[in-house]
């Protein structure tokens, strides 16, 4: 069930196809199910009104009886409605029409798709509303494609069954295509996060990146152990020492011009650098996690998955922008050579880091990755990392934390996330926190003074390695992995930050 990125004009849900039908009468549309969207204002207008008319007012009668309310994310299946060619209608509530956003439509369409994907279906239609913007349609298409895919990669009997065909009625072809490609990026990131750590480790993640790069036309460099040693990436290598599996650093370039360009261009600086933490399994090292805290630690590479999913989508969309993505890939294990509390490691930049906690490994890995990226002098850097439990304490499981050295850069990330319906919140980066990571032995230590403000002190360490380049750190420890189902996702990897990163690149490319 691999995710594919196809050329412009085609899209895929992972196994089925997505297409658009712009001149099809909903009443005559032959399908297993037709999904129609209902606001809390009633059945009076739009696509659902046409369906209501074709059924001689059956939807209006159900509304009058209180069986339909339009409440946000309410799913009501209706069988054998007379006057329609489809076998079933699913009415999907979206709440007040004046509050409708692309993010709400993403979740609404995903909720409908997830409910319908409980069994195999040949064809499912989604009826777009004429008043929806292209951005709203695009995110609805993406949500419908993401909702069909579960985390049951290794189950003999699948719980989720992608539709053989998804057809969007009354939606522009090019918008549907874009929505499908965005879903590909999200589903790629989700699949990588959901793979078990014995199948996805630094070498196999790098192989996955190479495969995707070949499909969408990305340049790729893979730094193996020997190259990492030559590049003096001793911080990343220290974290990797406890594992039998050697680390990797993957660099991906998409050169869609914009300000930057290829070799010989007057200015080849990337417009955007995406950096991802790629700890493919985190035992905590010698600061060992308890079993219940270790079970989901295959998700500790979700930042790397987001960076890969985003740059692959940016390339598939052919956006006019120069983007680089860099991911540092390690396992944090307890082997005989594992790095120890009290060790001092010298990062690639020359800064020395005293290790006070081997379970604060992600920032140590990213120290070297950020330094590699800074060599390229991008106009802005955005990193994503499942970095701290402290961020979840502050913001809960659904909101990512933002930290920055440049307010304009942070505002752009926040606007991109808001535009597609992912929740983020900026936390302070006061200079007072710098003192908390100072070491008596080395230049800095890898944790702050105690547990308080841990998400901020982690970000403060990362800030030391971006050389003043405008930078925003996104702590996705909460939203990257769903421990239990929601109406729109069955749990596991969520693909957090793929859509915001794509939206950010699109905004910068305008």
Image: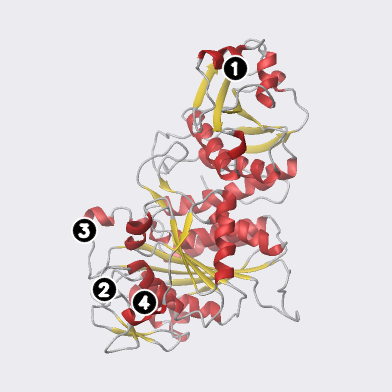
Give coordinates of residue 414: x percent, y percent.
Answer: 55, 59
Q: CA distance from mark 1 to mark 4?
A: 61 Å
The C terminus appears in which quarter of the rendering? bottom right
Q: For label 1, count other residues whose C-alpha is less than 10 Å away and answer few (under 14), some (14-19) or many (20+).
A: some
Specify which label sits upstream in the sequence, 3 or 1.
1
Numbered label attached to residue 87: 1
Does residue 168 appear left or right of residue 301 in this picture?
Answer: right
Q: Label 3 belongs to which residue?
A: 290
Q: Label 4 belongs to which residue?
A: 433
Q: For label 2, count other residues whose C-alpha is less than 10 Å away and answer few (under 14), some (14-19) or many (20+).
A: many
Say if 94 sits above or below 311 in the image: above
Q: Are marks 2 and 3 in contact (CB under 8 Å)?
A: no
Q: For label 3, count other residues whose C-alpha is less than 10 Å away and answer few (under 14), some (14-19) or many (20+).
A: few
Residue at x-position 41% and y-position 58%: 200
Q: CA distance from mark 2 to mark 1?
A: 59 Å
Circle 3: element type: loop
Q: Label 2 belongs to which residue?
A: 357
């Amino acid at each position: 069930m691999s995710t594919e990125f196809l050329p412009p004009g085609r899209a895929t849900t992972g196994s089925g196809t997505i297409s658009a039908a712009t001149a099809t009468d909903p009443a005559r549309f032959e399908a297993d199910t037709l999904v129609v969207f209902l606001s809390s204002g009633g059945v009076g207008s739009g696509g659902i009104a046409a369906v209501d008319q074709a059924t001689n007012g059956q939807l209006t009668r159900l509304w009058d009886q209180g069986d339909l309310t339009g409440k946000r994310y309410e799913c009501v299946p209706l069988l054998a409605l007379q006057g329609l060619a489809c076998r079933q209608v699913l009415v999907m509530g979206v709440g007040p029409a004046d509050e409708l956003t692309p993010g709400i439509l993403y979740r609404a369409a995903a909720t409908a798709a997830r409910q319908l994907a409980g069994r195999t279906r040949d064809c499912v239609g989604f009826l777009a509303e004429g008043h929806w913007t292209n951005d709203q349609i695009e995110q609805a298409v993406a949500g419908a494609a993401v909702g069909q895919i579960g985390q049951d990669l290794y189950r003999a009997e699948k719980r989720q069954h992608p539709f053989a065909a998804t057809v969007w009625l009354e939606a522009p072809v090019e918008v549907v295509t874009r929505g499908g490609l965005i879903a590909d990026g999200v589903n790629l990131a989700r699949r990588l996060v959901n793979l078990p750590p014995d199948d996805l480790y630094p070498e196999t993640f790098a192989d996955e990146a190479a495969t995707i790069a070949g499909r969408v036309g990305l340049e790729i460099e893979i730094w193996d152990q020997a190259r990492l040693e030559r590049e003096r990436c001793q911080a990343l290598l220290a974290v990797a020492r406890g594992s039998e599996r050697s680390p990797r650093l993957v660099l991906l370039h998409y050169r869609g011009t914009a300000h930057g360009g290829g070799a010989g261009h007057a200015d080849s600086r990337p417009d955007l650098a995406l950096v991802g933490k790629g700890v493919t399994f985190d035992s905590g090292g010698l600061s060992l996690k308890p079993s219940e805290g270790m079970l989901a630690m295959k998700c500790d590479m979700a930042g790397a998955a987001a960076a890969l999913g985003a740059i692959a989508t940016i390339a598939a969309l052919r956006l006019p922008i120069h983007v680089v993505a860099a991911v540092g890939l390690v396992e944090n294990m307890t082997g005989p050579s594992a790095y120890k509390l009290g060790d001092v490691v010298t990062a690639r930049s020359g800064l020395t880091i005293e290790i006070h906690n081997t379970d604060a490994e992600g920032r140590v890995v990213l120290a070297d990755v950020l330094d590699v990226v800074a060599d390229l002098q991008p106009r802005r850097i955005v990193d994503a990392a499942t970095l701290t439990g402290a961020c979840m304490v502050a913001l809960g499981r659904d909101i990512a934390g933002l930290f920055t050295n440049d307010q304009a850069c942070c505002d752009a990330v926040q606007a991109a996330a808001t535009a597609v319906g992912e929740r983020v919140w900026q936390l302070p980066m006061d200079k007072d926190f710098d003192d908390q990571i100072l070491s008596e032995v080395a230049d800095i230590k890898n944790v702050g003074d105690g547990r308080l403000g841990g998400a901020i002190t982690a970000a403060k360490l990362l800030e030391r390695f971006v050389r003043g380049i405008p930078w925003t750190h996104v702590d996705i420890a909460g939203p990257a992995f769903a421990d239990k189902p929601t109406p729109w996702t069955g749990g596991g990897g969520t693909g957090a930050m793929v859509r915001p990163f794509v939206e950010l690149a699109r905004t910068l490319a305008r």
